Amino acid sequence: MKTFKILAAILIVHSTMAFAQIGKSAGGGPFFFMDAANFAAKDTTKGRIEAFVKIAYSELLFAKYQSTLYRAQYEITYTVKDKQNNLIKREVQDREIVTDKFEETTSDLRFHFSRITLLLDPGDYSLEVMITDKETQKFGQRKLDIPVKTFRDKNIGISDLIFADRIQKDSLDDIVNIVPNVFKSFDNEFKRYLVYFELYNSRFAWKYKDSSGNLPTDRDRMTLKYKILDKNQKVVLQDSSEKEVYQFQTFSSIEIDKKNLSYGKYVLDVTVSLGDQRVSSKAVFDVRLSSFTNPTLSETAFDLDNAIKQMRHVARGANLSKIIKGPQEEKEKYFNDFWKAKDPTPETERNEIMEEYYRRIDYANRYFTSGFREGWETDRGMVFVILESPDDIERHPYETNSKPYEIWYYYQANLKLVFVDFQGIGDYELYNRQDFENYVYLH
């Protein structure tokens, strides 16, 4: 993300902390999201991969264009390789975004969407996507493993599942377009969650054709069942329906009622059967807190109890354990009221302070987790969350006459922090804690 600048120190309960953006590594390029799904192809020897890419406007550099507009140009390179790392296919797309609103050029909530269709022989592949910003020439890369099937090995089949923000249907209730939810993440204020997939039945031709416009009387009635499992593998929602098919490929969708789903990760399992034949397809999705308007945030956004627990570094003096044990409504009110009071731009949907805090929590969990403690709970994680990255780190992992230690330098604050791995297990403890506390809470 582009650098997030705070004009002044932010008052958090009894302490004052200056926040800065967790940036990319030096020379890092655009960050983006991608997903891919496997479908049947008309060519019976191939499988069809639909790949989707979504990038925030803020990840690209916009330049003035035609005096009143702003334009960003970027290139997407799709590279497919087999298990032996042999190049199978490479395709390039040139993409362009034009807007007349300057504020959109730095928005984390405006996205540009791209897709590509790839026809591949059955097998296991990797799909690497590279986005190059044409203005800066910086690039970002992501990679997915993509198993490819033709869906011809059985009499019936079901494709991969695609979560969708919108599914468009015509007057006959046939699906004509979908807008994929590349994040596989839904705000808990959504009334319903949409899922798209295709059903296959080898008894029929690819597409039914009749010049008269009449539908065939020869049909099969396939049974659709879905269930949703929570992180404990408990079924929290299930439903079933029937679908009449009269051609090989049938577009299908389901709408999931969100009333039984709270925040967290879930597995959607869709099964289709015909007689004694049965096939299924599974996918993971998230339901996040409505307070987290930015879907790019970490898993914190999917667990209210965890999000409150992780407020320990900013909600000093609050009995967070007691709050977590309280009623759901009270927990939501506490969480929302706390962060609303710290919102530097209350007139907008986003709460930049909250987003920045949980970005740091996410970073700390990725890089400072030790043993049974998550990264944000460790001393290095705590310091990172409160002060952000040091200006310099001096590492001493293999000293002869001392325990492994690190020194973090914050030059502007004239602060030097020493972390020592007393147990030799990578759990670095803050040695001069008083210096840290004096700076943070008394400075």
Image (spheres, helix red, strand yellow):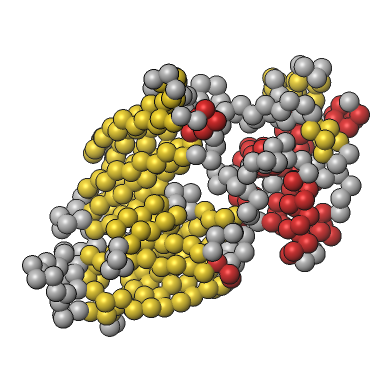
Residue positioned 89% across, 47% down in the render: 317
Reply above or below: 271 against 438: below
Reply above or below: 419 against 67: below
Residue 128 at x, y = what percent? 36, 38
Residue 26 at x, y = what percent? 55, 21
Residue positioned 23% across, 39% down in the render: 88
Residue 118 found in image quarter? top left
Q: Is residue 137 visible?
A: no
The quadrant of the image that shows the N terminus is top right
Q: Residue furthest front?
A: 68
Name the one closer to the observer, 298 or 94.
94
Q: Is residue 253 visible?
A: yes
Residue positioned 49% across, 75% down in the render: 238
327 horizontally vs 438: left or right:
left
Name the one closer to the observer, 375 or 301.
301
The quadrant of the image that shows the C terminus is top right
Residue 402 at x, y = what percent? 78, 26
285 horizontally vs 173: left or right:
right
Residue positioned 31% across, 49% down in the render: 50
Residue 35 at x, y = what percent? 40, 47
Reply above or below: 86 against 277: above
How many circles with numbers are drawn on the protein? 0
Q: Residue furthest left?
A: 211
